[in-house]
Image (cartoon, rainbow, N blue to C red):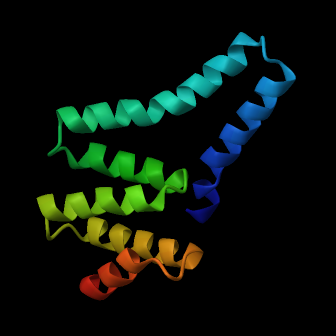
Amino acid sequence: MLKKAGLAKKMKKEIERALKLGPDNVNVHFSLMQYYLAEKEYLSMVDANPENLILQYEIGYWYQRTKQYDKAFRIFETILKIVPEEMNAYYLTKQEYQITLSYDVSHEEAKKALKRLK
């Protein structure tokens, strides 16, 4: 999963690099637009269906793949509030906090949350 986590970020960088090389290339602009619209689309679907766990997981995974770990664990915590016994959400939330701490050992929210989830 960690290999996939950097894929979206690499895609974005490649698209932006292509944009610099061919600023008039419509296909490159379209690809960049799709990247940014994906998050907005997920969020609008979640807003319309807040109890839909599949949508919640999808936006959580999106954040995870794009290394937006704070947002990812907020989504997984939301799932835990909706369905406290959901083990996948528990595991993923814990994993997000661990990933966050691997990048920022002083992240207080992640430290507190990990203690709470043990």
Q: Position of residue 97 (x, y in %)?
A: 41, 74
In which quarter of the view is residue 103 placed?
Answer: bottom right
Q: Position of residue 90 (x, y in %)?
A: 28, 72
- Is 101 located above or below residue 45 in the figure? below
Quadrant position of the C terminus in the picture = bottom left
Q: Position of residue 55 (x, y in %)?
A: 29, 43
User: Residue visible at 25% across and 84% down?
Assistant: 116
User: Residue visible at 40% across and 79% down?
Assistant: 108
Is 98 positioned to the left or the right of 46 in the image? right
User: Residue visible at 43% across and 37% down?
Assistant: 39
Q: Nearer the viewer, residue 17 or 3?
A: 17
Q: Number of labelled discs?
A: 0
In which quarter of the view is residue 86 placed?
Answer: bottom left
- Is 87 located above or below residue 39 in the figure? below
Is 62 positioned to the left or the right of 12 in the image? left
User: Residue visible at 17% across and 37% down?
Assistant: 49
Is 71 positioned to the left or the right of 84 in the image? right
Looking at the image, which residue sits at the far right?
A: 21
- Is 54 located above or below residue 92 in the figure? above
In which quarter of the view is residue 28 placed?
Answer: top right
Quadrant position of the N terminus in the picture = bottom right
